[in-house]
Image (cartoon, rainbow, N blue to C red):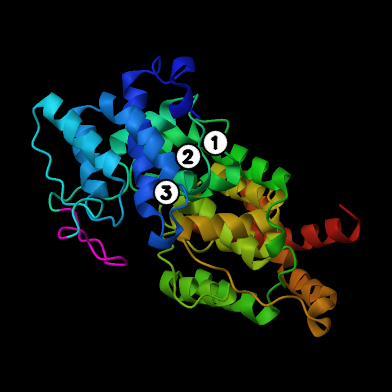
Amino acid sequence: MLAGHADVGLDAMRPDLVQVLLRVQTDLFAGAPAGARAGSQAFESLALALIPRAEPDTLRYVARQLALLPQLPESVLRAIAARGQELGLDIPLHAGGGSASSAAPPGASREPIPDGTPPAASTGLDLALARDSHALLGGRLLEDMVARARRVPELAEALLARTDVPARSLAPLYLHADQARRAALRSAMAQDGGAAAHSRLVRPTRERIAALHDAADNAENAAFGVRLAQGLGLTAVPDWRFDKPSRRDCLALALLALGAPEEAAIRIFLTLDKPLARDVAAVFGLVEIIRRTPRSVACALIEAVYEISIALPQRSAAQADTGPVMMQASEAGRGLGATAREALRAGTRSEASAQGRQIGGRESARRAIRDGG
């Protein structure tokens, strides 16, 4: 549309956006399957309109991207050559659209670019798009940018600052967000209703929760990670790293994804990692995540952050009635869960003092629960 109506927009486009648009369209065209380049004519029209305004780096980039593609339009090659002459550049043209002797055979695999330039858009290009509030991001382009942003904090920050990108698309960047933005992501994902695939996952058994408690009580982080992965139906154990403050949210989200009761999760918060147990505010924050985040959102976030696929079995008729089992698990954990709340109210204490007061508070907690407190 832009190429056919240059008088209404293309000629007035900022030079830097011309470079962005030409690179992105070249990436999309070069990345399409060889037999599915139905947009060849559209790309040709746009390329012919943009190449005369290409800067040296952009022209080299486009030439490299198109170099080994079969059946490249001759007009595009001629435009690249003409622009190269204008800029005084020596642009080697040995693409499939050139002479038959130099063309790459259909279906031939593309060799790595010699100078190491990645086939995807550069970080500079990504940042230009992410920071341009007028640039529409979506589809494969957005997915690729988010994937690269996982390794580029500056790009992650730029994408997270946008308000027009769906929260679910930004889920892989959760660890790059501050606490306020994380809360906003969880809330937005809960509202979009896009996590229905995880809405019928069964809850864990008493035995599985007990196994997690045993590992946490003994500070066996490796064993805890293995048992958690097994509970989520994973084929491999992710690099959980729950001991890092930036990943504490993931501990709460993983337990929520597993379906662990709140009181069981609180016990793990207070036993698995001593620095976390001593940070009352942090524990309260994790409890709030447990209470306010739908389980479906927790599943989606854990999958996105760790690039895994949760494979808990779907609810069956035999498993549908989990009420009695969970009531038993909850009853067994009530004393300790009430004790945890007592410890949180009291603030940071020494381990010995906290343990003594926990034991003393169990009977009063039980009485409060019986009285409906």
How far across and how far down the image is residue 23, in percent? 32, 37
The residue type indicated by label 3 comes to: Asp
Residue at 12% across, 29% down: 85
Between residue 142 and residue 283, name the one nearer to us: 142
- Report the residue that reaches farthest toward the right: 371
Query: Which residue has dot 2 on it?
Result: 177
Q: Residues within 10 Å of mark 2 (few under 14, many from 20)?
A: many
For the question of whether residue 48 can be seen, the reply is yes
The residue type indicated by label 2 comes to: Ala
Question: What is the distance, in whole Å, between disc 3 and disc 1 at their CAs?
Answer: 21 Å
Image quadrant assignment for residue 242: bottom left
The residue type indicated by label 1 comes to: Arg
Question: What is the distance, in whole Å, between disc 1 and disc 2 at their CAs?
Answer: 6 Å
Q: Left of 35 or right of it: where is 268?
A: right
Q: Main secondary structure of the magenta part?
A: loop
Query: Which residue has dot 3 on it?
Result: 144
Looking at the image, tell me whether mark 3 or mark 1 is earlier in sequence order.
3
Question: What is the distance, in whole Å, between disc 3 and disc 2 at their CAs?
Answer: 19 Å
- In the image, the segment drawn in magenta is 101-113
How far across and how far down the image is residue 311, in percent? 60, 74
Query: Marks 1 and 2: CB-CB under 8 Å?
Result: yes
Residue at 57% across, 30% down: 163
Q: Left of 239 or right of it: where is 314?
A: right
Query: Which residue has dot 1 on it?
Result: 181
Which secondary structure, mark 1? helix
Image quadrant assignment for residue 243: bottom left
Query: Marks 3 and 1: CB-CB under 8 Å?
Result: no
